[in-house]
Image (cartoon, helix red, strand yellow):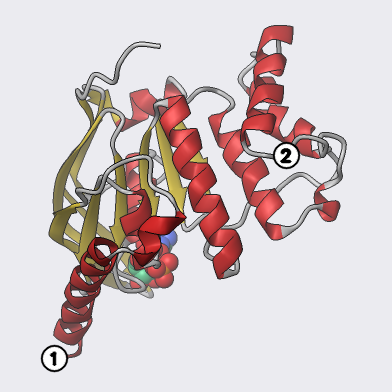
Amino acid sequence: MPKRQHQLAISVKDVSKVFELEGRELLVLSSISFKVKDGEFVSIIGPSGCGKSTLLRIIADIVNPSSGTVMVHGGSAAEARKARKFGFVFQDPVLLPWRTALENVELPLIIAKRNTKEERRRAAELFELVGLSGFESAQPSELSGGMSRRVAIARALVLQPEILLLDEPFGALDEITRQKMNLELQRIWAESRTTALLVTHNVGEAVFLSDRVFVMGTKPGRLISDVAINLPRPRNAELLEKPEFFQYSAHLTRLLMSTIGESKQ
Ligand SMILES: Nc1ncnc2c1ncn2[C@@H]1O[C@H](COP(=O)(O)OP(=O)(O)OP(=O)(O)O)[C@@H](O)[C@H]1O
């Protein structure tokens, strides 16, 4: 596989978003700008309601910005969506109950009319990569929360997206399962060489996985800090006990607390 190029993957410039709510205008995002390089793993943390999900949806061209621009590999977000550059993992995995676990992973192949033998073989490989071997024929109702999320991640990767957008994918999981999923996600990201943008409320998760962490403030939602996480990779569970991990976590927590303090004034 070619080495990561470190060219520009995502460029967000002066993006603002106003929602109409009961006849009133609500400024949700105010003049957000940042760049993400190819192959980078970036997390976004911020208080509830600061517009993290909205920002991810704007990048994926699910929601339009009120002003500003999003560029993906030099083209528009709409072009990137049409070229199926995005894999999106939502908080709730939402699997089709009448399809088996593997058939759920294969679903995007059918939608994209790429349901060839070769593509299905790759779907089966991905299924293995997310640690689900042996559960190909399982019904979604037979899967645990962690397993359903693995299916959702494999499904998001099956069309080999260049950009993986993850909106609190492990929010509902217990700490131990979440940590296992973080290790898996790190491995999958490294092997698939995708650019990843993760929204999370969990500061430890953001430090563990990311090259950079964006901290957002609220009312209106804006970027207040861009913190580089200079920890060697691959990262393992031992990192969670190291002083440098605590230092990054404490720094980010302080930044988060300062944004909450501000919004109450
Ligand atoms: N379609 C919509 N119409 C009106 N208001 C919306 C819409 N979508 C989101 N909002 C509002 O925009 C704000 C930001 O929502 P968003 O879900 O992006 O925040 P968030 O940071 O992801 O929150 P959380 O961390 O709680 O998931 C909230 O006040 C929300 O009520």
Label 1 packing within 10 angstroms: few (<14), some (14-19), many (20+): few
The quarter of the rendered structure image containing the N terminus is top left
| Total residue callouts | 2
**SS category of the residue bearing label 2:** loop
Could you say where residue 15 lies in the image, as x and y percent from the top left? 18, 49
Question: Farthest bottom residue?
Answer: 265
Image vertical order of residue 45 relative to residue 105, above or below = below
Quarter, ligand 1:
bottom left
The quarter of the rendered structure image containing the C terminus is bottom left
Q: CA distance from mark 1 to mark 2?
A: 48 Å
Q: On the rendered structure, is 257 left or right of 57?
A: left
**SS category of the residue bearing label 1:** loop
Label 2 C-beta lies within 8 Å of the nearest ligand 1 atom: no
- Point out which mark residue 265 bears: 1
Image vertical order of residue 31 relative to residue 216, above or below = above
Image vertical order of residue 183 relative to residue 204, above or below = above
Front residue of this view, candidates 7 and 13: 7
The answer to whether the residue labelled 1 contacts the one labelled 2, judged by CB atoms less than 8 Å apart, is: no
Residue under numbered circle 2: 132
Identified by mark 2, the residue type is Leu
